[in-house]
Image (cartoon, grey):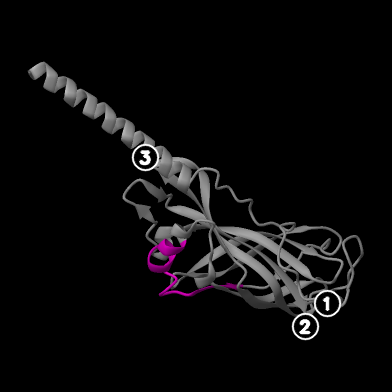
Amino acid sequence: MNGRRVAVIAVAVVALVALIAVGGVALYTTFLAGDNVPGLGLDTPAPSATAAAPISGPGTAVGTGDLAGLWTVASGVAGYRVRETFLQQNADSDAVGRTESVTGRLSADGETGALRLVSTQLTVDMTTLRSDKDRRGGQLRGRAIETDRFPTSTFELATPIVLPPDFGNADVAVTLPGKLTLHGVTKDVTIAAQARLEADGTVVVAGSVPIFFNDYGIEPPNVAGIIAVQDNGSMEFRVVFAKG
């Protein structure tokens, strides 16, 4: 009798382990596997920008006076990227959310003899962030970045910067020091970005900035300790500016 009970218990344990394993694989396959979205860059497809009068194009010298003035966001994409974990181990996918609700402006001048960005202001409507997985949207609205409580994120340039002299002739790397407000907290950040003057006269800027959740009082999403995310990620963007 005891031997039979031991055998029954052993079979039950094996069945339970198998069930957990199958369930774990199902969870991983349903929520995590294969979820890889390319980062935002200068060549990332984006909503069409508002047409602008041609100024010049790559490969053509541009005078600073041609580009000085006020520019507004014609179109843009912004969002988050964070590595997910499964049973406390890194998964092979990133949680990625995007929105096209980006507004703002920048102003430039050529008073120093070189093109200089004097100010930049960008606002992202965080309530419109969307992922390919609905479960993430629910986590963001009431938890994590709590878009119900903090509906916008903003970035403002902290100090004027001079663009590289070959801007207009080639893609250029730019460093944008500024203040990022996320989850109701404002921090000094430095954004690594690239900029390009397009043939239609628009300016495209794309980049990303690391985000450490503790710095912004953000609690990383966690589903019963099974599916979670790392304690850091990045915010990335691609913005098209049109003059005027």
Q: Is residue 42 above or below residue 63?
A: above
Q: Nearer the viewer, mark 2 or mark 3?
A: 3
Type of amino acid under label 1 = Ala
Q: Is residue 97 above or below residue 76?
A: above
Residue holding disc 2? 244
Residue 128 screen position, x and y as percent:
53, 70
CA separation in Å, label 2 and label 3:
56 Å
Q: Determine whether label 2 and label 3 are within 8 Å by CB.
A: no
Residue holding disc 1? 52
Q: Residue at x 48, y 46 (%)?
A: 32
Q: Determine whether label 1 and label 2 are within 8 Å by CB.
A: yes
CA separation in Å, label 1 and label 2:
9 Å
Question: Which region is colored magenta?
Answer: 137-158
Q: Reply yes or no: does residue 149 show up in magenta.
A: yes
Q: Quick check: 17 left or right of 79?
A: left
Type of amino acid under label 3 = Gly
Which of pointers 1 and 3 lies earlier in the amino acid sequence?
Answer: 3
Which of pointers 1 and 2 lies earlier in the amino acid sequence?
Answer: 1
Q: Reply yes or no: does residue 94 show up in magenta.
A: no
Residue holding disc 3? 23
Q: Quick check: 161 left or right of 164?
A: left
- Of the numbered discs in the image, which one, if any, rests on residue 83? none
